Image (cartoon, coloured by chain):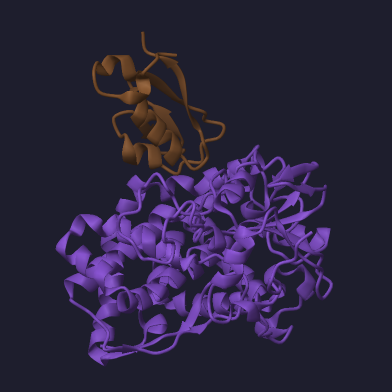
Amino acid sequence: MIGGAETGGGDDRADLVVVSVNQQVCIGAGQCEMHEEATFLLDEDTGIAAVVGHAMLARDRARKVMDTCPSQAISITETAP
Amino acid sequence: MIEAPIDLHAASSFQSGIPHEAFATMRETPGLTWSPASNGTRGFWSVTRYDDLVTVSRDPETYSSGVGHIQIYDIDEDALEARASMIDMDPPIHTRLRRIISSAFTPRHVQGYRQAIQIRVANCLDQLEREGGGNWVDIVAKPIPIGVICDLMGVPEPDHDFLIELTDYLVAGTGTEPLEPNAYGNTTDLRLLPFNSPAAWAMSQYATTLADQRRRVPADDLITKLIEAEIDGDRLTTDEFANFFRLMIFAGNETTRSSMAHLALYLHQFPEAFTALRQDPSKLAAVTEEVIRYSSAILYFRRTVTTPTVLSGTELHVGDKVVMWYSAANFDETQFPHPHEFRTDRPITSPHAAFGGGGAHFCLGASLARLEIAELISALIDRDISFASTGEPTFVESNFVNGIEILEVTL
């Protein structure tokens, strides 16, 4: 765990985490896509979320979007190198 | 074992709306509060604190939706099976059913209905203004949501009133007003019908007829999606489809209606909030959420304990009924400071429980409900509609829904 990541500010790179979606649990509520559309995308047909691109977010934003997921399908998997 | 201060089995306990005083007492009482058996319905535990409710909601393995009914009353196995839809199921089967239609309800998809919603809102408000007022529920709160969900499902416009009539009887079934058992030509034992109501039978018949039509001529609607869907290579049975249809019509109709009905009260009771909104349109989302929280359209849902556990210091045994009172948790001051204030500054990281406490059953229609209510609020602001007077609301007689039947307004 990167210490001091909670305080924010300073070097943003130190605060980046990788997020992932547990597709077994995802109910397609779409809150993630609504709040972080560069990171999450719901499949047109199935409505299930997936991360896009490098799936990296500032830790506080990752925490926030995790909280908005109604089925707790989002998790932080690792800190960025 | 501390007992609830009011009879939560009884619709009469809710005849003036949410029983805030009793719920406040229950929130402050350590542990869960007990409601003894009544009229053949087994007793149950009540959860009224926000944190406890979230715990229950997010643990379907311990607190199951599939093992007993999700209403307080008890029903037999066969009766449960006859009416079961995804709301009465746990993951993984719940998830597979929900996914048949969930893509139609994502925030992005829902935006596509905006114009259709605006048209319905406009028609209703035109009538209200033409008539100088009237029963807000009949003119505005009822027709908008039923119109929207019927459009989504693929129910033709001329049939909307019939479905309103049927869902009204279903809700009345949660109170005391009975239909004749053979109403609508019903011949099924009431015990096996959802809400023990012949109106449920009528709705199943109607749904089945529509399904047959869509099988012959598919359309771009949810009925078609449902009849074409396959789980493990099997299509939904007639009953499964009818139960799904009924769930959607009920859920997409009663609930939003209730919040829209209460909106008229809040417009009158909390004018500062709406003045603030007029001056700062960016507050629309916050005002919409506050309408939804404050009105808590669904008062509760029930879960059944599957493994012994302890919640908030109370020991729970297998088979215990645990009732999540969303309408109590939504006024928990530890989560919502000054809960009885209608505030436009509550943080989004403090979500209310009106769409549920989170987990797999989180309200499917949340984004749709938000959009409908937001469009209605916007239109009221744009048209500068205010009420010279509002009558006392007549609440729907139910311990399940926080509905309003009559709310006379004059412009």
**B316 or B89, which lies in front?**
B316
Q: Nearest the camera: B60 or B311? A: B311
Vertical order, B219 against B107 (above or below):
below
- In the rendered image, the residue lying farthest to the top is A81
Indicate the position of residue B116 as horizontal and vertical percent values.
29, 64
Query: Residue A1, percent across and down?
Result: 44, 14
| Residue B220 makes an appearance in the image | no
Left or right side of B293 for B194: right
Q: How many marks?
A: 0
In the displayed structure, B270 sits above or below B117; it is below
Q: Colour of chain A?
A: brown
Point 47% across, 58% down: residue: B217
In x, y percent, where is residue B324? 63, 57
**Front one among B353 and B373:** B353
* Residue at horizontal 27 percent and vertical 79 percent from the top: B125
Apparent colour of chain B? purple
Along the line of sight, which residue is nearer the eye, A44 or B29?
B29
**In the image, what residue occupies the spot 38% across and 29% down?**
A62
